[in-house]
Image (spheres, coloured by chain):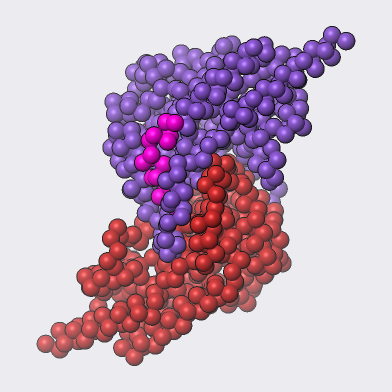
Chain colours: A red, B purple
Amino acid sequence: MNRFFSETTKRLTPYVPGEQPKTGHFIKLNTNENPYPPTPGVEEILRTIAPDVLRLYPDPVALELRQSIAKNYDVDTDSVFVGNGSDEVLAFLFQAFFGENDIVAFPDITYSFYPVYAGLYNIPFITVPLTDLWTIDLSAYPEDIKGLIIANPNAPTGIAMSAEKIEMVLKARPDTLIVIDEAYADFGAESVIPLTKTYDHLLVVKTMSKSRSFAGMRVGYAIGNKELLEGLIRVKDSFNSYPLDVVAQKAANASFLDKAYFIETVNKVIETRERFIESLCSLNIHSLPSKSNFVFVSVPGVPGKDVMDHLRSEGVLVRYFHMPRLMNWVRITIGTDEDMIKLTELLHRLTVNHNIHREK
Amino acid sequence: MNRFFSETTKRLTPYVPGEQPKTGHFIKLNTNENPYPPTPGVEEILRTIAPDVLRLYPDPVALELRQSIAKNYDVDTDSVFVGNGSDEVLAFLFQAFFGENDIVAFPDITYSFYPVYAGLYNIPFITVPLTDLWTIDLSAYPEDIKGLIIANPNAPTGIAMSAEKIEMVLKARPDTLIVIDEAYADFGAESVIPLTKTYDHLLVVKTMSKSRSFAGMRVGYAIGNKELLEGLIRVKDSFNSYPLDVVAQKAANASFLDKAYFIETVNKVIETRERFIESLCSLNIHSLPSKSNFVFVSVPGVPGKDVMDHLRSEGVLVRYFHMPRLMNWVRITIGTDEDMIKLTELLHRLTVNHNIHREK
């Protein structure tokens, strides 16, 4: 290890994102990308933006974009913070609110970047196991935690919690910062953004990567009480005053201005997901009830890694997590209907071959 | 202060960037932006990029761009790290290499973000005063520092140091990480990038914001020994796996492919700077010898803040720093010849009025 590494760097275990293959020969269902392009308004921005604006620094507070987001959710502009992907927003949040004398908690199975952030800022954390039904048992979290981070729907299970349940936690824990990561909520979970007006210890994190087809553009945001957001702003302005470039700001704004397209494409993904879950059911392949743009799937008798490898050899990428409870599962992103029909056929053949092999 | 702020957040004093006015009625010479647009190749990227690529995550390692940068400087691709502006690269660097038991050092007058980074990561730092001639006295830095951060040319003075002097420090201090921030070096300073092949304790940080007219696009990079860069990569992958969006990657790549345009526009800025310095000289206005795209200027008898305020009232923005040694100075970005002629006239009238007023 290099002699100049800081103590932090020495002990880091970085997050490993899903594969981004350089060639286009795969059906890519491994990183929860949207199968549809962003709203046509985004293309218009790209085609018409004056190159001359690139020579100037972008608006450091991204006012226009924050106004559009605020209008979309009927909250104050001061309640909206934007960053370079929700990953950056989450990183800022961990540093803004937690330190080495605090404890944060999250489920044992959830977005695997949370423990990485805790490591990056030397924040002690505890994890609480999901129930046998893969749900989050909020009563199992200890009293003395400063922060509770919940992805809703959770990843990679796709299972969502009701806003009512989250409000019960908000009432029961007035001195715990409750962070709800709604990266996938647009695909069918109830958002708790309206509750940010009532509870000053609630922070909702969202991304444009999935439901708005913006993974390549890197825009995420947080919505919460203005005084809480001040913490994020202080960290951001001590890290990089201009996290969002001018093209990303304008393109993101265009996305929020086209509500009809957003609803249409999100609904298409939801409908494809429901059809896909039905076909899995008819093949006797297990899946969890998803409110996201992915489905967590277990092929009886076939380890998750084998499922992933087999599908890869057939030209389809899905994600496998090498963790004790997840050995028999893969996470499958919802693509187009065509993608999912092809995948269903492959899964069908896999189960048939497995059963023939077993009967021999 | 909000009850959830971490200890770090409580003690932060964020960096304050120069004003980005919302209206276009100013000649903007306050944030060292380039007066010329980026290479036409950047416009071509914007006009032709398929919106569909935005739905996919960008290449997390920005390979194509790093290859172009590597080719440009004749270094290995593994020696190039890219980030969302050099501010992000600097932030990563402070966290990657320094901790609360290390000491970093930099001049008392330099890029004012350095002490902010140190504060963000709780890194002790010392500052060493510039000499009376506004130069950096490298022999004045103590032995026991882990890192030495030098902006070359320095800001806001614009004064550059020779590569020979930097190499002497590299030889004299084999166990100090030497960071050379070459944000402005393309405008006439000697780059020490070739020395990164010889010295494994040298890290050079660059930005595309100034010399490549990319302030709005947020692309910075670092060049250094591969093992050293591994530290930056570990921090980046624990913070945000995809700091550079797909449009920024492609546009930045286009900039590096057009060397002729880069040389042409940089030379135009240098020529304008030299003409501007000559006219200041003929007006008996002090300026420091600049190797950057700005000039540090003192109007005899007129405090810097008054110069800034007066120019602002006449439609020209320049930057003033409220610090003891800098009270009589303003930093003026080099714009077009037209901008600088207008500014020179305003400065001329300011000195005439001041002298008339004094003689009364």
Which sits in the foreground, B51 or B102?
Answer: B51
Q: Is residue A156 left or right of residue A51?
A: left
* Extreme residue toward the right, this view: B360
What is the x, y in percent for residue B324? Answer: 68, 21
In which quadrant of the rendered image does the N terminus of chain A lie?
A: top left
- Residue at point 39% right, 88% down? A278
Vertical comparison of A240 with B264: above or below: below
Vertical comparison of B288 with B2: above or below: above
In which quadrant of the rendered image does the C terminus of chain A lie?
A: bottom left
Q: Is residue B22 left or right of residue B123?
A: right
- Residue at point 54% right, 32% down? B114
Which sits in the foreground, B206 or B112?
Answer: B206
Which sits in the foreground, A146 or B51?
Answer: B51
Q: How many marks?
A: 0
Displayed quadrant of residue B337: top right
The residue range painted magenta reads B247-264
User: Is B176 included in the stretch rendered in magenta?
Assistant: no
- Residue at point 46% right, 83% down? A271
Residue A283 in view in this figure: yes
Q: Is residue A148 left or right of residue A113?
A: right
Vertical comparison of A293 with A14: above or below: below
